[in-house]
């Protein structure tokens, strides 16, 4: 890599090697923007070709998943596991079941995971996987048959010291249970090969809540750094899945008022705030009845449903995008800035576009990127692995304290490398802090 390598030169090569993978290009560009100047200032990384190596997955496994639906029809989906980097620990990262899943999305998620897992301070490598299978509208038996078929192949590639997947969009406690049961049956072995398990068979307390809670903690740290806090703030949240709902729960516990939630059909706005009682109803709607968020307005007067829209033009102090990638663009960012939003913490992975992030920085809005703000989920997954290895279970209080401490230390790492600008550049801080640990390990291994 020459001394005068530019971001555009590097990206041109990456795009050529990975044609058409737009989400992957976007994720790498965002990181390379901060890492290239750092590497040019630190020739040891440059000489060892670390940027080129860290953007190339260790391996990618793609496989056919065949299953039978309830009418006896044979269905075929595609399964993936991207084992991105195991320099600092076994591959670790979620499985996503959604019709939009493709290699570009999984490579972007796996790449982000490298930095996120490094930031957690735990020994976790990075991976991501899933399938274009759509669990929506499927019966429980169909989901079971799909999960069993998916795991029959995936089982060849994972293990407690090799690769330990978890959940993500479309993969919750039920899917994890079906897959864990199938692994156990095939290998005749009870071991911690998945996280997000139920408490009865090796799960961890607070794992379900961890990503959302961690995101709220990260926001609290960003505000505390400025002598402020979540208390009394109006908050808008997108999504109504695992991350969104528990982010809403912790934000409320910290004294904020949550005004919105959403799903892929639109968003609900409740000017009175989504109280703990209303949130309990949403949990039942989403996790048990698998219903639509629109139904909220049939139960709680004063709330409005906005079909096909996202919540970003609602006036609020704090925003938490917790649904999916690229759900907040430059137009949304302009709305947020002009409505007085002071901070954004990403519960989802890469929900804000590069242009939106640029606008937040220009307007002095505190911006916590997903790789830092949503790392609580994988951190507690790491602690689930520790508990499995030690064959013990920590209490909910202990787990929440550990989660809070980890989010505090991630925040400090970001501040350490991102405080040369005002406000603190958490994107740069997270990218550089996450990079150093993995790059040092890769250097130590020599040319591999
Ligand atoms: P869930 O499947 O539980 O919920 C996803 C939510 O996002 C649902 O409300 C869903 O609506 C909505 N959504 C999905 N796709 C779209 C879309 N294209 N447009 C609008 N809304 C959409 O997933 P999670 O809560 O687990 O994950 C949410 C995000 O958080 C993802 O980016 C994930 O990668 C990230 N994340 C998750 C972690 C975890 O521990 N679960 C850890 C770290 C990051 P609908 O029901 O209509 O599809």
Image (cartoon, rainbow, N blue to C red):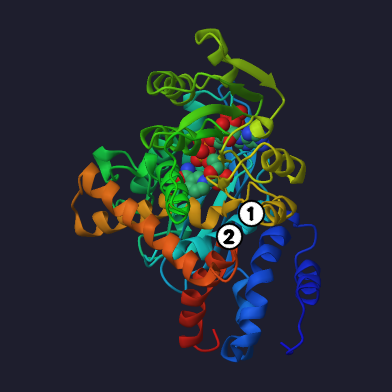
Q: Which mark is residue 364?
A: 1
* Picture coordinates of residue 48, whole percent (x, y): 60, 88
Residue 123: give x, y in percent of width and height. 37, 67
Disc 1 under 8 Å from ligand 1? The reply is no
Residue 27 shows in this picture: yes
Which circle's residue, 2 or 1, is located before the other in the chain?
1
SS under mark 1: loop
Residue 128 visible somewhere in the drawing: no
How far apart are the two marked residues, 2 and 1, measured between alpha carbons? 6 Å
Residue 90: horizontal and vertical position, in percent?
42, 66
Q: Nearer the viewer, residue 295 or 364?
A: 364
**Position of residue 262 measured from the top left corner of the image (x, y, whole percent):** 59, 28
**Number of marks present in the image shown:** 2
The 10 Å Cα crowd at callout 1, few under 14, some 14 to 19, many 20 or more, is some
Q: Which mark is residue 218?
A: none
Q: Where does the C terminus fall, quadrant-wise?
A: bottom right
């Amino acid at each position: 890599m020459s001394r005068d390598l530019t971001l555009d030169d590097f990206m041109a090569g990456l795009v050529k090697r990975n044609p058409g993978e737009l989400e992957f290009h976007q994720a790498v560009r965002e990181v390379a923007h901060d890492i290239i100047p750092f590497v040019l200032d630190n020739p040891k990384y440059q000489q060892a070709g670390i940027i080129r190596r860290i953007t190339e997955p260790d391996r990618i496994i793609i496989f056919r998943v065949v299953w039978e639906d309830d009418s006896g029809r044979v269905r075929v989906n595609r399964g993936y596991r991207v084992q991105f980097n195991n320099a600092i620990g076994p591959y670790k990262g979620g499985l996503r079941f959604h019709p939009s899943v493709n290699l570009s999305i999984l490579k972007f998620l796996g790449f982000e995971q490298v930095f996120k897992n490094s930031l957690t301070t735990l020994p976790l490598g990075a991976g991501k996987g899933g399938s274009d299978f759509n669990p929506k509208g499927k019966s429980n038996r169909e989901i079971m048959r799909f999960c069993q078929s998916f795991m029959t192949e995936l089982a060849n590639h994972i293990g407690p010291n090799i690769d330990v997947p978890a959940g993500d969009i479309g993969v919750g406690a039920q899917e994890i249970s079906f897959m864990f049961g199938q692994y156990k049956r095939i290998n005749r072995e009870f071991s911690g090969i998945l996280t997000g398990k139920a408490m009865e068979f090796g799960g961890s307390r607070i794992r379900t809540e961890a990503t959302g809670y961690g995101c709220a903690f990260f926001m609290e740290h960003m505000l505390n750094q400025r002598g402020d806090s979540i208390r009394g703030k109006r908050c808008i949240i997108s999504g109504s899945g695992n991350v969104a709902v528990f982010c809403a729960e912790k934000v409320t516990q910290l004294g904020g008022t949550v005004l919105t939630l959403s799903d892929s059909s639109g968003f609900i706005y409740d000017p009175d705030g989504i109280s703990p009682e209303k949130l309990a109803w949403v949990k039942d709607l989403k996790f048990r009845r698998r219903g639509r968020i629109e139904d909220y307005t049939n139960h709680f007067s004063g709330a409005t449903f906005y079909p096909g829209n996202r919540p970003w033009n609602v006036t609020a102090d704090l925003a938490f995008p917790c649904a999916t990638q690229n759900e907040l663009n430059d137009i949304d960012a302009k709305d947020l800035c002009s409505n007085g939003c002071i901070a954004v913490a990403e519960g989802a992975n890469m929900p804000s576009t590069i242009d939106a992030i640029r606008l937040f920085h220009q307007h002095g809005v505190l911006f916590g990127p997903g790789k830092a703000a949503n790392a609580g989920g994988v951190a507690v997954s790491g602690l689930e692995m520790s508990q499995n290895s030690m064959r013990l279970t920590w209490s909910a209080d202990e787990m929440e304290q550990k989660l809070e401490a980890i989010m505090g230390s991630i925040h400090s790492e970001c501040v350490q490398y991102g405080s040369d600008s005002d406000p603190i550049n958490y994107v740069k801080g997270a990218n550089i802090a996450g990079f150093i640990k993995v790059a040092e390990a890769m250097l130590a291994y020599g040319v591999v």
